[in-house]
Image (cartoon, helix red, strand yellow):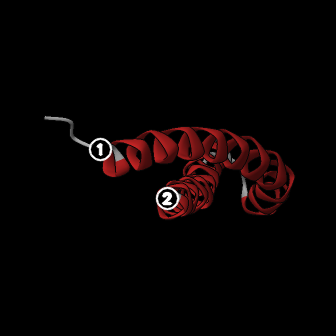
Amino acid sequence: MTKKILICTFLALFSGFFGGYVGGQITQSLHNQKCQNQPWGWKQVCGAWTTPTAMWQGGTTGLWTGTILGAFVGGLVTKQIRE
């Protein structure tokens, strides 16, 4: 029983952190695309302005989504098959 809990917890935490990282990167990329049509100096200012917000939004969303999906997969992996 303890092994199942550890496996499920590890999968949930790992996928949550991974989802947070990937979500932050994707959201940052999407936000930075808005800055591409700016002149050179404003492009850097725009990128510096949008990056923290994008990382926070994407990271938080990815963390929640990854944790929930990881816990679900962990539950499926550790489920006992009854005959």
Residue beneath label 1, please? Answer: 80
Amino acid at dot 1: Gln
Q: Residues within 10 Å of mark 2 (few under 14, many from 20)?
A: many
Q: Residue at x 32, y 50 (%)?
A: 77
CA gap between label 2 and label 1 equals 17 Å
Kindly state the secondary structure of the residue where label 2 is placed.
helix
Tally of numbered discs: 2
In the displayed structure, does residue 12 sit left or right of residue 80?
A: right
Q: Residue furthest front?
A: 83
In the displayed structure, does residue 26 sit left or right of residue 82?
A: right
Q: Earlier in the sequence, mark 2 or mark 1?
A: 2
Q: In this view, does 65 lie above or below 38?
A: above
Kindly state the secondary structure of the residue where label 1 is placed.
loop
Residue beneath label 2, please? Answer: 11
Amino acid at dot 2: Leu
Picture quarter with the C terminus: top left
Q: Residue at x 73, y 62 (%)?
A: 40
In the rendering, at what x and y percent does residue 41 appear? 81, 62
10 or 67: which is nearer to us? 10
